[in-house]
Amino acid sequence: DAGVTQSPTHLIKTRGQQVTLRCSPKSGHDTVSWYQQALGQGPQFIFQYYEEEERQRGNFPDRFSGHQFPNYSSELNVNALLLGDSALYLCASSRSGEEFQPQHFGDGTRLSIL
Amino acid sequence: GDSVTQMEGPVTLSEEAFLTINCTYTATGYPSLFWYVQYPGEGLQLLLKATKADDKGSNKGFEATYRKETTSFHLEKGSVQVSDSAVYFCALLYNFNKFYFGSGTKLNVKP
């Protein structure tokens, strides 16, 4: 049973570029959440997708957008990259109707902005 | 708003020492509380959880009790091992599966 998988594992971009990160949820999960983890910090909630729609959003600018596909996989897009966007981006999945149950995390994509 | 505060690290202990990592939270309702662990180069792994007041979560020798009166969820282990070296995150789950994480506490265990 595959857990949450993310790709790529590492990515290097320059300021102003755009990036797309991908996530496949754990089998049986239909909800995907994205988090940004800056070095030495805890993960910060970006947004959550359910039924192909953004269900809720954290305190991140519109440069951060996402998408969920019919197979529940998800993408995180970041436009006009800034140096401060350098971080580990974590995807987590869960099953709807099981609120208050833990999310399952992938190993993340390490994004470096030069 | 909802938030989690953890004790700052790093915490350095000798093998077999007793561990406490403090965590307090602020929440407008009745959240579930979790401890996650992150090993170098990896994502977060669930360590333990508690979903209501006075619940005790436990796993792999780690324990934490949900204290509503002190809004705390301190992590404890009676005898740490070198393999426990990692970063530990306290988290609050509230409002439709949205996690609030603390800033993490790095634990170093020396042989």
Image (spheres, coloured by chain):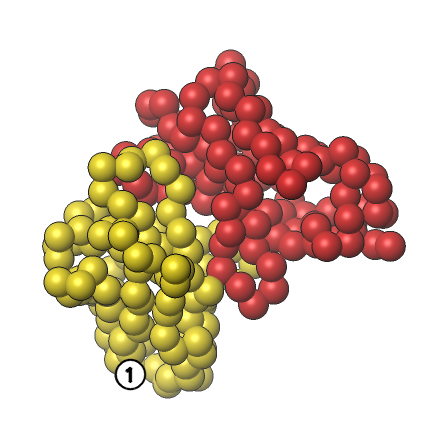
Quadrant position of the C terminus of chain B in the picture: bottom right
- For chain A, the rendered hue is yellow
Relative vertical location of residue A32 with respect to residue B68 in this rendering, above or below = below
Q: Is residue B108 rendered to the left or right of residue B74?
A: right
Residue B34 in the image: x percent, y percent? 48, 37
Q: Which chain is disc 1 placed on?
A: A
- Left or right, residue B39 beside residue A45: right
Q: Residue furthest top?
A: B69
The quarter in which the N terminus of chain B is drawn is top left
Shown colour of chain B = red
B74 left or right, relative to A41: right
Q: Is residue A39 above or below residue B76?
A: below
Please tell me which residue is depicted at 42% across the width and 27% down the height of the picture: B51
Residue at 77% from the left image edge and 48% from the top image edge: B81
Which residue is nearer to you in this view: A102 or A42? A102
Vertical placement of A84 versus B44: above or below?
below
**Number of residues whose C-alpha sits closer than 10 Å to that of mark 1, classed few (under 14), some (14–19) or many (20 or more):** few
Q: Can residue A90 be seen in this view?
A: no
Res A98 quadrant in image: top left
Label 1 sits on a secondary structure element that is loop
Q: Where residue A15 appears, x then y in whole percent?
A: 35, 82
Is B36 on the left or on the right of A62, as rendered?
Answer: right
Image x and y of residue A28, in percent: 27, 52
Return the x and y of residue B63 as percentages of the image width and height. 63, 31
Residue placed at 27% from the left, 76% from the top?
A20
- Kindly indicate the quadrant of the structure image that contains residue A66: bottom left
Q: Which amino acid does label 1 sit on?
A: Gln
Residue ID for mark 1: A17
Does residue A110 sit above or below A93 in this rendering?
below
